[in-house]
Amino acid sequence: MVAVQSWGRLEAPQHDTQSLSDRAQVPAQLAAASAARPGLAYGLGRSYGDVCLNPGGLLWQTAALDHYLAFDDTTGILHCEAGVSLRDIQRLCVPRGWSLPVVPGTQFVTVGGAIANDVHGKNHHVAGSFGDHLRRFTLVRTDGSVRECAPGEPMFAATVGGLGLTGVIVDAELQLKRVPGPWLTVETLPYRDLHEFFELADASEAGWEHTVSWIDCLHREGRGIFMRANPADAADVDRAPPAPRAERRVPLVPPVSLVNRLSLRPFNALYYASKGRRATSVQHYESFHHPLDALMDWNRIYGPRGFYQYQCVLPFATGRDGIRSLLDAIAAAGMGSFLAVLKTFGQRASVGMLSFATPGVTLALDFPNEGERTLKLFASLDAIVREGGGRLYPAKDARMPRELFEAGYPRLAEFLPHRDPGISSAMSRRLMGR
Ligand SMILES: Cc1cc2nc3c(=O)[nH]c(=O)nc-3n(C[C@H](O)[C@H](O)[C@H](O)COP(=O)(O)OP(=O)(O)OC[C@H]3O[C@@H](n4cnc5c(N)ncnc54)[C@H](O)[C@@H]3O)c2cc1C
């Protein structure tokens, strides 16, 4: 047994692990192993909470399923194994004029993990989420059966956003999109309050492919920095900076969280002041989409107790008031971190039965783990989300109550019959009873 953590480092439960590296062997491996006890696929552990953990049980590590199977650079169709990381795909394909259509805030995510959480990026209003660009995938069940799944089929819709609970994905075929190169033209605009945020979001939806904002979680009016970007044209590339340099690393876990009440307020004020004027720049896609990837192991800054992320989405009808109430509660508690993101999702239904992204406004915030104090704040945030008809993101969650999950995911009953009985996770036991 070895200790395995997810990105939030809240706990380090013991697991048996088994590396999957030969996809022809996976059906037999799953059937043999899960006869004894349930297992769960584990990609790169970039989920924050317990969706990728199976304490006391088995984890099938998928990162060695890392082969490319085919790439057609006239159509942009890529066929690869499910353990290939999004970073490797981008570094291979962007220089050839093709990009993944949807990327989350970190590139250290496997294709299988991106499907299982149906991840979203900064371009949801244009491209939807990861599952919208899947042509097919191969799913292995723990009874040893192999299923080819394509859009329109129930097992496809159950597995996209299915939290790893329907089987192990061993390979997938993705439709990439054309890009002129690795550069983006980025506009940075400060906003003074939530009203200005929503105006900017509305005004940017038609003409900008990527939109996102940093929000000062301690500021009651909800000031922040709005960023919008489009692929850069050739004229801009001449004045582009060099590609990002090699990553740096947080070398150790400090004895206490470096993010705390003393550090947060001055950091937020300084950051807002430093970006206080409208500006245009040309940025490499890695800097724009994945700024945190430049600092490896940054999750250590929260100290030995780890941290939570709280990410919710509220429908547009309740979003304006709801986000204000959430910020009020967070500011009143004096908690949160400088990693706080506010953005809108487009009017587009996701393909997965349990996909998170849905039309509305999403707020994501990191919180150092301060035990009961943090959980008490979350209970008050949950009440606002429930009242506003919203939902929380399982990829980021370690503690949402079961009734909030059931209320937020109305297709849960449709999903449950598709579960693989040989698969279980800490999250599925917490939210689905097994
Ligand atoms: C800094 C940072 C920024 C992030 N930004 C975003 C963002 O902008 N948008 C967003 O949507 N998410 C974001 N995330 C979350 C991240 O994209 C997801 O948690 C993603 O699913 C992690 O992928 P992984 O390969 O690490 O999978 P893991 O975290 O290891 O596993 C996630 C789930 O996928 C399942 N799984 C993994 N591989 C397979 C497989 N082969 N077959 C079946 N199931 C499988 C696991 O069982 C588990 O349920 C961010 C995370 C970090 C750390």
Image (tube, grey):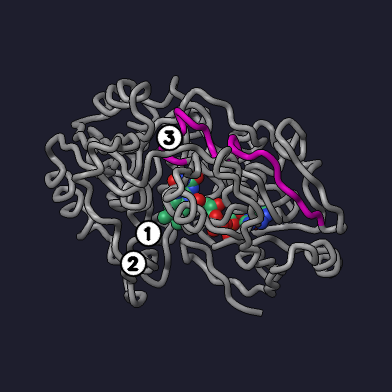
- Residue ID at (37%, 52%): 290
Task: Looking at the picture, tell me which residue is in the foreground, 429 or 269.
Answer: 269
Location of the C terminus (image quadrant): bottom right
Residue named by callout 2 = 247
Mark 2 or 1, nearer chain start: 2
Name the residue beneath numbered marker 3.
Answer: 123
Q: Closer to the camera, 303 or 227?
A: 227
Say if mark 1 contacts mark 3, CB within 8 Å: no
Amino acid type of the residue that numbered disc 3 sits on in the rendered structure? Asn
Q: In which quarter of the image is the N terminus?
A: bottom right
Q: Which residue is drawn at 78% across and 45% down?
A: 148
Q: Residues within 10 Å of mark 3 (few under 14, many from 20)?
A: many
The part of the chain drawn in magenta is: 121-141
Residue 277, x across and y down, in percent: 12, 37
Q: Please identify the residue farthest to the bottom as the structure is shown.
A: 1
237 in magenta: no
Q: Which residue corresponds to mark 1?
A: 293
The residue nearer to you, when weighing 347 against 328, is 347
Residue 117 coordinates in the image, percent (x, y) = 58, 47
CB of mark 2 within 8 Å of CB of mark 1? yes
Between the C-alphas of marks 2 and 1, the distance is 7 Å
* In the depicted structure, whether residue 341 falls above or below residue 209: below
Q: Which circle marks residue 309 in the picture?
A: none
Indicate whether 168 appears above or below 248. above
The reply to whether residue 310 is in sight is no
Is the distance from the Cβ of mark 1 to the nearest ligand 1 atom less than 8 Å? yes
The crowd level at tag 1 (other Cα within 10 Å; few <14, some 14-19, many 20+) is some
> 10 Å neighbourhood of mark 2: few (<14), some, or many (≥20)?
few
